[in-house]
Amino acid sequence: MNDQFEFSGGLKKLSFALIGVGILGLILQFLVYDSASRIWANVLLNNVFFLGIALVGVFFIAASTLANAGWYVMVRRIPEAMMAFIPYVFPLMLITFLVGGHDLYEWTHEYLYEEGGDRYDPILAGKQGYLNTPFFLIRMVLYFALWTGLAMLIRKVSLKEDIDGGTTNFKKGGIYAALFIVVFGITSSTSSWDWTMSIDPHWYSTLWGWYNFASMFVSGLCVITLIILFLKSKGYMPQLNNEHLHDLGKFIFAFSIFWTYLWFSQFMLIWYANIPEETVYFYTRFQDYKFFFFLNLVINFFFPFLALMTRSAKRQTVAMAFVATIVLLGHWLDFYLMIFPGVGEHIVGHAAGVHVVFTPNPLDLLLTLGYAGLFMFVMFTALAKAPLVPKNHPYLEESITHQT
């Protein structure tokens, strides 16, 4: 059994080629798009989307550890490799805000807080204690410091366990997992308020943190599934069986329903109350992005619900690969609809009479391919640095003999 992944030259070339495509896409956006806001919205979208996938790697391990799950041990090294991408997003997020902050976030403009001025905004002035540039940057640094630090500790004890054996490192991993769950429970919400909800600074939702988490969690599960299927196709991890694939399929199925529950809960209450300051969020997306608004619901709920309903579908590699790919693209669209309409409304607010609609096009996807290439390079590099199977994990035997 080959338990050491080899990051082949072909895979590296593919990663670099995708990164090149992304750079080309970014250059073309600067040449084609009239609005810098759209370009920075694209960068923000991919920062948030791929960061969410990386964070799910840590969350998946932490939640499974605290649940004393045994089945996941065979696939543990994959989410461990995914979380290596977290620190790479930090400079990208920092540049995005420092350079493109005024194009993305209405609340960054100082004239909104000049009492007595023509453009004074009393609502945003009331939120200035939280929505201000210094505190925003402090929170960003704190998020990445906590996420990266705890991810490194979880990875460190996992690798040390391979060498030392016993249960000492396993118990330490449980402590770090508990700390991460507490930290992530808070920061996953506050970071989503900062990076996506504050694009529409007059609007808020008490479900926003959960809704963002559900979307990123399903995306992360899809990426874990696709990496597993890729490794299996190359002859790695032969002991990983259909039972493990089945469990991942159940997770994607269940959390697609959970995402829909949150989507509907947020939409239904706002629609039923019909209060203008609440309905503005959905009005913009329904009026200008109607096709994508409903496509989002079809891809992220109806499709996985119907495709993964049967037991057999969750045990077929081709079916799982197809579903995971489509649902992953669906949640990219979900984040697109969170970010782009709000950025368009920001432009409208600063240019009376201008109506801006940013619908997805191929240039947007080119930049996403670039981020995918960078993610692949970082993730596969981390994956190649340790055995694919945690050799001394206490639950390894349970995972190998796992039956649903």
Image (cartoon, grey):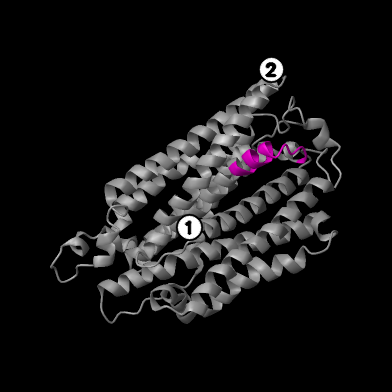
Task: Identify the magenta region.
Answer: 59-71
Residue lying at the far front in this picture: please name it. Answer: 273
The quadrant in which the N terminus is found is top right
Residue linked to disc 1? 367
Q: Is residue 98 left or right of residue 145?
A: left
Residues packed near mark 1 inside 10 Å, few (<14), some (14 to 19) or many (20 plus): many
Residue 378: tell me if it is visible. no
Residue 122: tell me if it is visible. yes
x, y percent for residue 2: 77, 31
Amino acid marked by disc 2: Asp
Residue lying at the far left in this picture: please name it. Answer: 116
Q: Quadrant of residue 352?
A: bottom left
Could you tell me what secondary structure mostly forms the magenta stretch?
Answer: helix
The residue positioned 35% from the left and 62% from the top of the image is 30
Total number of numbered labels?
2
Q: Quadrant of residue 301?
A: bottom right
Instruction: Name the element at disc 1.
Output: helix
x, y percent for residue 57: 60, 43
Please tell me whether mark 2 or mark 1 is closer to you in this view: 2
For marks 2 and 1, the one nearer the N-term is 2
